[in-house]
Image (cartoon, helix red, strand yellow):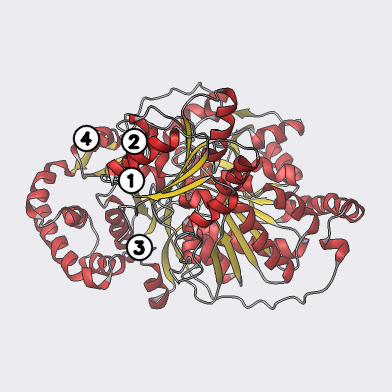
Amino acid sequence: MYDSGLMATKKKSTKAFLSGNEAVAYGAYEAGLKVACAYPGTPSTEILECLAGFKDLDVQWSVNEKVAYEVALGAAVGGVRSLFACKHVGLNVAMDPLMTSAYTGISAGFVIVVCDDPGMHSSQNEQDTRWVSIYAKLPMLEPSSPREAKEHIKEAFKISERFDTPVIVRMTTRISHTKEDMLLARRETAKTAPLDINVEKYVMVPGYARKRHALVEKRINKLKKFAEKTRLNKVEINDKKLGFITSSITYNYIKEHYPDASYLKLGMSYPFCDDKIREFAKTVRKVVVMEELDPFIETHIATLGIKFKAKDESFMQGELTPDLIPAAVQGKVKKVKAAPKRPPRLCKGCPHFFSFATMKKLGLFVAGDIGCYTLATLPPASALHTCVCMGAGVTFNEGLRKAHPNKKIVGVVGDSTFVHSGVTGLINAAYNNAKGIIFILDNNITAMTGGQQNPATGLTIRNEKTKKLNLKKLCLACGADNVDVCDPTNRDEFNALVEKRINEDALSVIIAKHPCKLLR
Amino acid sequence: MNNKVCNITFGGIGGQGVLKASEIMGWAAVYAGYHVKKSEVHGMAQRGGSVESHVRFGRTIYSPLVAEGCTDYLVSFHRDEHDRLSVFLKPGGIDLIEHLDDANKAIESPRYLNTFLVGVLSAKLDIKKDCWMKAIKTVFRKEFVAANKKVFLDGWRLGQK
């Protein structure tokens, strides 16, 4: 269970030492939040875990990000302040409701917190979520530190209600997982808005959606004016020879190297404050745009006809760490250092080892996805062969078999991942008469993100008992021909079962059931 | 309080309690009235992989990460990781690696390594003892506070030598 010592602090004094994620939680709480939903995902997980500590909030682990987004959005449409949190790739899962929620707007404040992972500390890609703000036409805030994260969340709720829009707050791993001292404030009280019927706003059929789209365009223009005035976009004029336009954690890294330079820090990174940018560019002799990952600010500033320097494209990959700042500012090509870090691996005695030992022994081609078990790709297990996204262990089995119907191909998925998005793949496999074995590696926890509950564990985010999902019955209902439950640590029994099923012309599910070693 | 920024780098492997060590350090600096930033790694990186955590404190702190060649104190929990992290040490910086073997010998259980090493570190820093004690009380659950205070003081005594 989550334990940071911060609850104790709350009682004793108003000073706290919080991570960026905890700061998001405290900021939201202080802003009068009522409902928060998420699916776990590093580096975002602690936001909900921290919120769950506030007993007067309605907080849930949802089945997946799409569900989480919709429940939280529903609460905001219903009239209470709500929050959805996810990692960058989690936002992809929620993109369907996100895009149209930009049209409906909300009745009470709704904030989307997305945590990007530059450097891919714990992710399968390095996408830069800032582009989503342009694509969805939603305002985006970018705090540069935990202290700012707390303030920005509060501001985000205000913007949300003032402009009738979801607001995206974009964090990165370094901000989420940096701790900083800060002061706590009192919780605001917010009234629940009445549940009025407003079909033109909340039923997005073409006739109404066209009208809403016109409002979305108007809204973004109003937000542009707001961006010019808000103190989220901070100008610091010092030495006028050199001026940086920057955002997020990068601001803090540059300040270490160039303390005397001038700065325009974009705390609101979309829509852009064009006038402020132009004025800043006129004030300083040389403009340098410095940002982590994609050229998001650069691309926009180029359209303003402003002359500026920026990092070489080689810096678009990986974290823009403090060590790299001087070379990036000087426009040099990035020198990649071979960092002999100890790679992560499955824990000693992990039940996944046993499952993968059998698969390796039988020479199976194993489609996998996202979880601790992805680590079975590496030695000593060396038995997992694909990983693209959540749930794809199930669907890749089907796709790979279309290319090689006679090969021994199987899919693996975790208990939480199966519920997240494996189940739709299993229904699809049954419906389209696919064969093979789907292993549900059921360790009774969402392990990789640090041990969160899920529907199959039968416990809530607060470890309270709830309805427990019966995986076996579910798989049978999906249309699997066989569903076996077997403990992979009983090697002989497990081996025999897999050997039997792999030679059958059937769609089989084997629930490899053994609790995670880290569960107490 | 002067303008000086103090940089500390903790490093080890997942499960050794590196983050708990930097947590004690961070809180002690908070209680001493400093602006503090501490970086961590979570998730996949913790699964037996390299774990490093930086703590920086002073009047105003910008970056949560220490740049290479800038750390004042390097606290390693593992020899292999020490080799990787020694690039962070500044010329003349203090390397606590010489205390690692003594620490491992002095403690009853490997789970006390973090608190012990922080105790060693505390002897080198200008932070009052009551700040450390408050930090330990904040960071650990009630039933573990007394044991950790004792281990901390053992480390502190070793650090004085």
- Is A301 rendered above or below residue A17? above
- Residue B30, disc: 3
Q: Mark 2 sits on what residue?
A: A358
Left or right for A172, reference B4: right
Q: Residue shown at 31%/29% (left/top)? A: A340
Q: What residue type is labelled 4?
A: Asp
Considering only order in the chain, which callout, 4 or 3, is on the residue closer to the N terminus? 3
User: Is label 1 in contact with label 2 (beta carbons under 8 Å)?
Assistant: yes
Where, quadrant-wise, is the C terminus of chain A in this rendering? bottom left
Q: Where is residue A158 in the image (x, y as percent from the top left)?
A: 69, 65
Disc 1 designates what residue? A488
Q: Are marks 2 and 3 in contact (CB under 8 Å)?
A: no
Q: Quadrant of the N terminus of chain A?
A: bottom left
The one of A56 and B117 positioned closer to us in this rendering: A56
Q: Dot 4 corresponds to which residue?
A: B80
Graded by Cα atoms within 10 Å as few (under 14), some (14 to 19) or many (20 or more), the crowding at tag 4 reads: some
**Is the residue B34 above or below the residue A140 in the image?**
below
Q: Which of A343 and A96 is in front in this view?
A: A96
Tag 3: amino acid = Val
Q: x, y percentage for residue A322?
A: 44, 37
Which chain letter matches label 4?
A: B
Cα–Cα span, label 1 and label 2: 9 Å
Please report contact status of discs 3 and 4: CB closer than 8 Å, yes or no: no
Residue B100, quarter of picture: top left
Element type where label 4 sits in the image: helix
What amino acid type is highlighted by mark number 1? Pro
Query: Which of the pair A63/B131 is nearer the observer?
Result: A63
Mark 3, secondary structure of its residue = helix
